[in-house]
Amino acid sequence: MNLRITKNELKTILSGKSGTSQDAVIQAITSYLRRGQSSSRVAEEKFQNKGEETARLIEFAQKHNLFIKGISDTDFLSSGAEQKVFIKNDRHVLKLNDAIYYASWEDYFLNLLLHNYFFSDTSYEFLGFYLSDSILYAVVQQVFIKADSPTDLTHIQSFLLENGFQLKKNHDYYHPKLGIILEDLHDENVLTCNGMLYFIDTVFYIKPELFWL
């Protein structure tokens, strides 16, 4: 990994200046949320503005026809603290996330862009928004990975260390040269199939004071 090239590519993607076609809507939403805001806002300030972000996202979804209907409980697969998972077909799942792990919705969408850059084999395709019991969810589609063996946590650690991520504690990692935090990489979020690791659920954050240097 050439760190200079990687960091420049990530900066252009997160700033909305380049990226894949499936990133375009995510970038548009991120830019919409970022208008008039500082990228260096502290987490407390972001959290205080999260309700305002939600209201703005509802307006954005209404204006651009991004609300999804008809997600059936019969297709429900599983849920965790951060999201609900539904079967879409034999190749894909739908994931509904209310951004509870993030101080802001902007941070959640930056996480999607980072995931798609680092783990394109399990990339997220943003489909729209879903409202349920007055809770706003982002809806993404992802390839369905069926594990064929338990994931060895030491394999995750070795893979990330080779790519510059240092273990902080438990299942959390940090890339000091990129200014990127990657958390919650336990064996349910990283699956093993045919001897390959598949990162299906990631929690990325950036440290703005380092990332944007």
Image: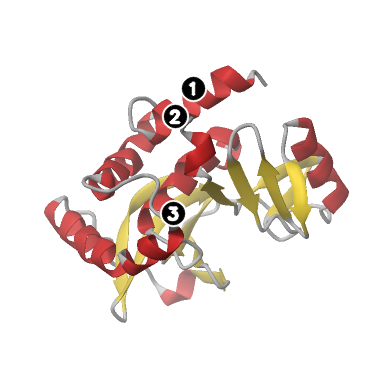
**Residue under the image location 45 percent in, 51 percent down:** 141
x, y percent for residue 74: 46, 75
* Residue 125, visible in the rendered structure: yes
Per the image, label 1 sits on a secondary structure element best described as helix
The amino acid on which the numbered mark 3 sits, given as a three-letter code, is: Tyr
For the point 49% across and 29% down, the residue is 213
Label 2 neighbour load within 10 Å: few <14, some 14-19, many 20+: some
Q: Is residue 15 left or right of residue 54?
A: right
Cα gap from disc 1 to disc 3, whole angstroms = 21 Å
Q: Residue furthest left?
A: 63
**Which residue lies under the disc numbered 1?**
8
**Label number found at residue 167:** none
Secondary-structure class at tag 3: helix
Q: What amino acid is found at the position of numbered circle 1 in the picture? A: Asn
The residue carrying mark 2 is 11
Nearer to us in this view, 26 or 30: 30
Residue identified by numbered label 3: 108
Secondary structure found at label 2: helix
Q: Is residue 125 left or right of residue 24?
A: right
Q: CA distance from mark 1 to mark 2?
A: 5 Å
Instruction: Give the residue type that dot 2 points to.
Output: Lys
Nearest the viewer among 112 and 182 is 182
> Where is 12 relative to 78, above or below?
above
Point out residue 137 in the picture as x, y percentages from the top left corner. Answer: 36, 65
Q: In the rendered image, which quarter contains the N terminus?
A: top right
Image coordinates for residue 151, horizontal then vertical, percent: 81, 53
